């Protein structure tokens, strides 16, 4: 572009000099002033605009709106000099979306916010809202078919995080035909549908990796487990079928394909694997490690969530050097968490001092587990983990050793 691009901020976007007016700004300066400005004084609303000074152009100089009362204005694309410079305006809009996350777009506009920025919404909050709507739509069916609220919300949350939004979108669409539900329900359904279609679901801090069954001769397809749950039941299933082998005869096995969804170094990723129950490899991680070493070389099984969906990850040795150790650490934390639950529920005669020590140890260990999970999922580069709590009480140590035997 041959020309000088500058920005201005006006308290009144209908008459720019009626009220506070700042000009010759960079975009960052304009956004800062815009955010600080009280836009409630004048009816026309505050905004951001820009000027393009081109001495050699027939247009020479023009003044154009970009933001008006927290809404992107794209009218400049309808005429020159920007009709033929759409890429320039779209880049400005993209920068504004990053600087003003709450910015809106006019309904029916050629471009919408999702064209410029990836929107994330908490899966946990979305699950809660969907659950509430399910109850409101048909309370009797909810009680008879679903029952437990917290279990249902956990199920919905897991499905939203593992590419399972579509069934909920279809359900919300179906509600639009049920006018008898009332205006409030229909508005809620429409808003949820739009958010599910346009936003990605964000994970909770310290969220445990999730394992989704894609194809199985044993489990329900679409069933979702935590990594720890999957490790235990996969190991048990493999052992049961392995024990049914008869020497000299063809051995039994049952196929299972799965996807592991997880957060590592601030990236949402998905690792696809498979396990033949009965081969004797053991749990999910042991089998996955064998697959990586013997079968997955040269195959693309790891993807990362990006704006266009899950895309292949081509980082060299990432599976063996980063992902497998990451999953193993999560598995170790899960096992430690199970030990703490057992210790917390242990019922035997001990002194009050020992009970106090035990409670404190469990509390500190659970805090350690939470901290480690947050670091595993979000911290980039070299990860720095806290020291695990130390069990000082001799009587408690003895009890802990007995439980581990």
Image (cartoon, rainbow, N blue to C red):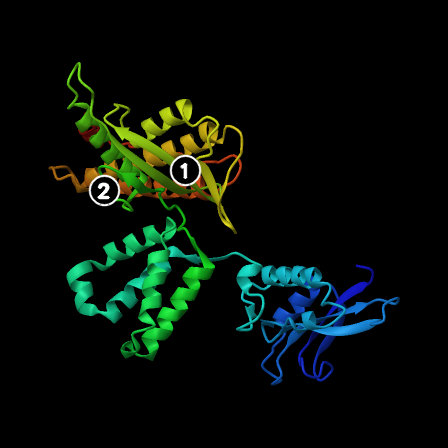
Viewer-side label of 2, 1: 1
| Disc 2 residue crowd, few under 14, some 14–19, many 20+, Cα 10 Å | few
Q: Residue furthest front?
A: 250
Residue receiving disc 1:
271
State which tag comes first along the sequence, 2 or 1: 1
Q: Residue furthest left?
A: 349
Q: Quadrant of residue 174?
A: bottom left
Residue 73 seen by the camera: yes
Does 351 sit above or below residue 52? Answer: above
For residue 356, the mark is 2
Picture coordinates of residue 256 (x, y %)?
A: 29, 35
| Disc 1 residue crowd, few under 14, some 14–19, many 20+, Cα 10 Å | some
Picture coordinates of residue 271 (x, y %)?
A: 41, 37
Q: How many marks?
A: 2
Q: 121 or 141, which lies in front? A: 141
Picture coordinates of residue 7 (x, y %)?
A: 73, 68
Q: Residue at x 20, y 59 (%)?
A: 146
From mark 2 to mark 1, how far is it between C-alphas?
42 Å
Are dots 2 and 1 in contact, CB under 8 Å? no
Under tag 1, what secondary structure?
strand
Q: 191 or 373, which lies in front? A: 191
Q: Quadrant of residue 367?
A: top left
Left or right of 174? Residue 297 is: right
């Amino acid at each position: 572009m041959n020309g000088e691009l500058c920005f201005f901020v006006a308290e009144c976007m209908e008459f720019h000099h009626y009220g506070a007016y700042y000009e010759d700004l960079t975009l960052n300066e304009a956004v800062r002033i815009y955010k600080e400005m009280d836009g409630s004084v004048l009816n026309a609303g505050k905004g951001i605009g820009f000027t393009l000074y081109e001495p050699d152009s027939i247009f020479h100089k023009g003044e154009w709106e970009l933001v008006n009362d927290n809404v992107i204005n794209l009218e400049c694309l309808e005429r020159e000099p920007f009709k033929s410079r759409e890429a320039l305006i779209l880049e400005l809009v993209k920068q504004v979306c990053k600087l003003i996350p709450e910015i809106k777009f006019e309904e029916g506009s050629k471009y919408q916010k999702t064209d410029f920025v990836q929107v994330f919404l908490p899966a946990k909050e979305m699950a809660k809202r969907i659950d509430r709507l399910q109850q409101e739509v048909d309370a009797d069916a909810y009680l008879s078919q679903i029952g437990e609220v917290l279990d249902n919300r956990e199920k919905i949350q897991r499905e939203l995080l593992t590419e399972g939004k579509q069934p909920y979108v279809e359900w919300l669409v179906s509600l639009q035909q049920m006018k008898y539900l009332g205006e409030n329900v229909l508005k809620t359904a429409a808003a949820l549908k739009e958010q599910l279609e346009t936003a990605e679901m964000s994970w909770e801090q310290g969220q445990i990796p999730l394992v989704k069954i894609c194809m199985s001769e044993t489990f329900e397809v679409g069933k979702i487990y935590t990594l720890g749950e999957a490790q235990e039941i996969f190991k048990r299933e493999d052992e049961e079928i392995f024990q049914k082998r008869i020497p000299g005869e063809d051995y039994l096995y049952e196929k299972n394909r799965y996807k592991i969804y997880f957060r590592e170094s601030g990236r949402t990723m998905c690792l696809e694997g498979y396990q033949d129950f009965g081969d004797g490899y053991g749990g999910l991680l042991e089998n996955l490690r064998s697959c990586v070493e013997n079968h997955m070389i040269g195959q693309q099984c790891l993807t990362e969530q990006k704006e266009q969906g899950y895309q292949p990850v081509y980082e060299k040795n990432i599976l063996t050097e980063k992902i497998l150790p990451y999953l193993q650490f999560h598995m170790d934390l899960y096992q430690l968490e199970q030990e703490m639950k057992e210790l917390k529920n242990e019922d035997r005669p001990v002194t009050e001092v020992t009970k106090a020590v035990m409670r404190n140890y469990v509390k500190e260990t659970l805090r350690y587990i939470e901290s480690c999970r947050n670091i595993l999922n979000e911290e980039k580069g070299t990860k720095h983990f806290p020291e695990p709590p130390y069990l000082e009480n001799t009587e408690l140590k003895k009890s802990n050793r007995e439980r581990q035997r």
